[in-house]
Amino acid sequence: MDKEELWQALLAQIQFNISKANFATWFRNTNIVSKDNGGVVVSVPNNFSKEWLENKYNKLIFKILHSLDEEIKEIKYNVVHAETKPKDISASQLIDNSYNNSPQLEFVELKVDKETNLNPRYTFNNFVVGPFNELPQAAALAVVRSPGTSYNPLFIYGGTGLGKTHLMQAIGNEISKKFPEKKIKYLSSEKLASGIVSSIQNRSIDKLKLLYKDIDVLIVDDIQFIAGKEKTQEEFFHIFNNLYEKNKQIILSSDRPPKAISSLEGRLKSRFEGGMIADISLPDTETRIAILKTKSQEKKLNFSNEVIEYVAENIQRNIRELEGALNRLAAYQALNNKTPDVETAKTLLKNVIFSPKKAINPDNIIKSVASFYDLKEGDILDVSRRKEIVKPRQVAMFILRDELKSSFPFIGRKFGGKDHTTAIHAYNKISKELEKDENLAEEINLIKDQIYSL
């Protein structure tokens, strides 16, 4: 077995022993460069990978290599800086090779394309994949392969800062590369709504429809914000139908699934649910480490494993916050010409890293529940028995008890001086419904994400 065959055989076994995210991060662009007298030298692309393979995976690598070739007695790792630039990779190649052989990326602040509104920085190459986002990523690659036919519309949902925008823009950028003739437009729901409102006011709605008529790929971020806006929903319904009937690709994102968007017209919910719905959940610790390592490599930063692990273990709910913490450490390093250690990181990030349980309070919970169900905070606290009010109020009472361990008398007083038995009834009712209603469980998890992101 020659060097290349030996390493490929090892990689095949490694994939079954570690997560895909870790495999993509630590074994990308590695190979055996020499094998002589029982010693093996493995090339790695940077010091991060070298340290990680030596400290975390050396025993596993040695065990597998020794089982493949009993003459191997020692392994060394050598940093070999790749000079190659990122290659153009087709969608089919991305599917086959998304966890290995991806080129190293250099971090560059790139300008947003004025025609498409896409940021070239968002690509599949720097989108870290883990158990929390494998489904939407796989669906995204299928859309790239065949826009308008696979998963149309593609509806991606999840909490704030988990990578929805990155993934949607990566789809747009990859389609633009693969199908340069296609017209792509990315925009926020606010921009969509303001354009529709302006066209109605100026009596130029037909002109607006013409602008959308020729789009091949329409990408709308945070579509939940059109809820409650009747005219915007009506016009978007027509835009949606026109594109859909012509097999044009539609990609939408939201902080919740379509069925949980209150004040969204039934016909739009039906359209949104007619394609592929994929959720991005919270990343696990090892995926957060992989994300930090990837972003460090992009920005050419060289923090210790201890610092990276500290950040990953303490910032758990938001990828955007992970990058913010990394930027803060990078600023310290640039200003002081000194790489921060763990103690320095603790000081620099003390305002970022905190216990979520201590940070939230009853008002935050009520505010988040009201926002989720498109109500005013006063509606939930009111004595109204309207169906659209009763459920959100019970959910708020449940979360107060479940997250803050608030007493039932306190909860009753918080909601207009109600008796504590009302709070007990609400808690027990939601608890029982959670056992059989997956949709309710999903709603409450999304509300909790909002609470912790305040």
Image (spheres, rainbow, N blue to C red):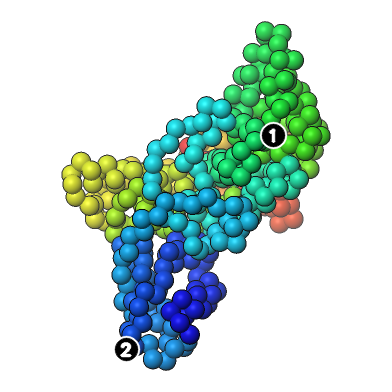
Please give the name of the residue rendered at 20% of the width and 41% of the height, measured from the top-left corner: 335
Look at the image and tell me whether residue 414 can be seen.
no
Identity of the amino acid at label 2?
A: Asn
Q: Is residue 58 left or right of residue 200?
A: left
User: Which residue of the protein is positioned furthest toward the top in this rendering?
Assistant: 202
Callout 1: SS: loop
Q: Is residue 433 left or right of residue 322?
A: right
Identity of the amino acid at label 1?
A: Asp
Residue 362 drawn at (x, y percent): 51, 38
Q: Residues within 10 Å of mark 2 (few under 14, many from 20)?
A: few
User: Looking at the image, which is closer to me, 240 or 379?
Assistant: 240
Classify 366 as above or below 278. above
Please give the name of the residue rendered at 34% of the width and 43% of the height, measured from the top-left corner: 327
Q: Place residue 248 in its image quadrant.
A: top right
Please give the name of the residue rendered at 41% of the width and 71% of the height, measured from the top-left corner: 31
Q: Which mark is residue 216?
A: 1
User: Looking at the image, which is closer to me, 95 or 131?
Assistant: 95
Residue 78 drawn at (x, y percent): 30, 70
Classify 275 as above or below 217. below
Q: Earlier in the sequence, mark 2 or mark 1?
A: 2
Q: Place residue 44 in its image quadrant.
A: bottom left
- Whether tag 2 and tag 1 are in contact, CB under 8 A, the answer is no
Classify 187 as above or below 22. above
Please give the name of the residue rendered at 70% of the width and 25% of the height, measured from the top-left corner: 212
- Kindly identify which residue carries mark 2: 37
Residue 158 drawn at (x, y percent): 59, 45
